[in-house]
Amino acid sequence: MSRILIVDDEPQILGLLRKLLEGNGHEVHDASDGGKGLDKFNSDDFDLVITDIVMPGLEGLSFIRELRRVDPETKIIAISGGGRIGPDTYLPLAEDLGAFLSFAKPFKNKELLDGVAEALAE
């Protein structure tokens, strides 16, 4: 069983991802912004982090940058629905900062599960 940290400010997204991932045998922890996510990451061990990009407080790109500083080996999947400039801009930046994969919201469950499996297999 893999331990996954999900960081997203939308409770419904957190709930959907939790249900999807737990239903596939993963242990899921969550945080509502990058600052809380960083606190959880620093106090526990995770095999994978899934983070939104556009969030209040510590946003996703800064969160990814900080995760890379703390632990360059952690696998990260970035997700985004956009914001003012859209996911087509944010997600390539997330990958440039060290995200293993990225997905624009809405994504298909199978697509995300395949990405999770690929990240965990690395």
Image: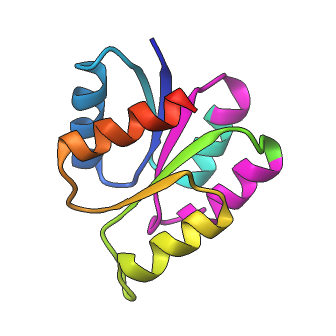
Q: How is the image coloured?
A: rainbow
Q: Is residue 50 one of those drawn in magenta?
A: yes
Residue 75 in which image quadrant: top right
Q: Quadrant of the C terminus?
A: top right
Residue 30 at x, y = what percent? 44, 35
Residue 59 left/right relative to 25: right
Horizontal relation, residue 56 to residue 18: left or right: right
If the image is split into quadrants, where does the N terminus sit? top left
In the rendered image, residue 79 lying in the magenta stretch gets the answer no
Residue 41, horizontal then vertical, whole percent: 65, 34
**Residue at the location (29% across, 20% down)?**
22
Q: Position of residue 99 (x, y in %)?
A: 58, 55
- Left/right placement of residue 71 relative to residue 29 reads right
Q: Position of residue 58 (x, y in %)?
A: 60, 62
Question: In the picture shown, does residue 95 fall above or below 86?
Answer: above
Q: Is residue 4 left or right of residue 105?
A: right
Residue sitting at 30 percent across and 36 percent down? Answer: 113
The answer to whether any part of residue 59 appears in the image is no
**Can the viewer see residue 91?**
yes
Residue drawn at 66 percent across, 44 percent down: 38
The answer to whether 84 is drawn above or below residue 55 in the figure is below
Tell which residue pokes out farthest to the bottom in this image: 85
Identify the magenta region: 41-69
